Image (cartoon, rainbow, N blue to C red):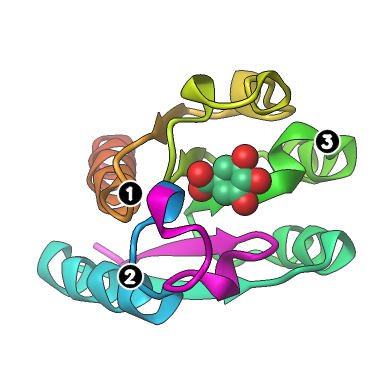
C-alpha cells in the first residue's frame, strides 16, 4: 500500500500564532502545531506537508497543484469571505477537513458563516491546536477506509 500524503494549509495571520490573541488561539506557535502533526503522521504512517500564506491567490495556487490524497485547511479569515478558495476546492475535488483553533460559533456573527463548510468532509473548531490533530485522525481514518 502506498504511503498516504496529507497536506496542511494554514491561512492568513496564522504565522503569528504564539503571540496573536492567545485567549482565542492559545500559546503554541505554528511551528509547534506542524511539529505535532508531523509526529502524529509518523505514528499513523502519513506523510505530512505544511504550507502557510497570507495571500488568497497563493493558497488557491497551492490547492490547484496539490499532490496529496487529503487536505486539512484552516482558511482563517478567508473562511468567511473566499468564494475563490471554495471554487479551487471544488475544482480539485480533494477530501478536506476545515479546521479552526477557536469555536467560531461562539464569536462574532460574521465568523459563523463559512464559505466551504458544506463541501468539506467535516469541520473541527474550538479545540485549539488539538483541532488539527483531531482532524488528522479523522482524515486518516477516512482515507484508509477508502483505500482498502
Ligand atoms: C480562525 C477563526 C477565524 O475567524 C479567524 O479569522 C482566524 C483563525 C481559527 O482558527 O479559529 O484567523 O480560523
Q: Quadrant of the N terminus?
A: bottom left
Nearer the observer, 83 or 32: 32
Q: Upstream in the sequence, badge 3 or badge 1? A: 3
Q: Quadrant of residue 119?
A: top right
Say whether marks 1 and 2 touch (CB < 8 Å).
Answer: yes
Q: Residues within 10 Å of mark 3 (few under 14, many from 20)?
A: some
Counting labels gives: 3
Decide if residue 28 is in sight here: yes
Q: Quadrant of the C terminus?
A: top left
Tell me how far mark 1 sits from mark 2, CA to CA.
Answer: 9 Å
At 30% from the left and 51% from the top, the residue drawn is 136
Q: Quadrant of residue 30?
A: bottom left
Q: Which residues are magenta?
A: 1-23
Q: Upstream in the sequence, badge 1 or badge 2? A: 2
Quickly name the residue at label 3: 81
Q: Is mark 1 within 8 Å of ligand 1?
A: no
Amino acid at each position: 500500500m502506498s504511503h498516504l500524503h496529507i497536506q496542511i494549509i494554514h491561512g492568513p495571520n496564522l504565522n503569528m500564532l504564539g503571540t496573536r490573541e492567545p485567549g482565542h488561539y492559545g500559546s503554541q506557535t505554528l511551528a509547534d502545531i506542524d511539529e505535532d502533526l508531523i509526529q502524529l503522521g509518523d505514528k499513523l504512517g502519513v506523510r505530512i506537508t505544511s504550507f502557510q500564506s497570507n495571500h488568497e491567490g497563493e493558497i488557491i495556487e497551492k490547492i490547484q497543484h496539490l499532490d496529496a490524497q487529503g487536505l486539512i485547511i484552516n482558511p482563517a479569515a478567508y473562511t468567511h469571505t473566499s468564494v475563490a478558495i471554495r471554487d479551487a476546492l471544488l475544482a480539485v475535488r480533494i477530501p478536506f477537513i476545515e479546521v479552526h483553533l477557536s469555536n467560531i460559533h461562539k464569536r462574532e456573527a460574521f465568523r459563523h458563516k463559512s464559505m466551504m463548510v458544506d463541501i468539506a468532509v467535516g469541520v473541527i473548531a474550538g479545540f485549539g491546536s488539538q483541532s488539527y490533530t483531531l482532524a488528522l485522525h479523522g482524515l486518516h481514518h477516512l482515507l484508509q477506509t477508502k483505500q482498502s
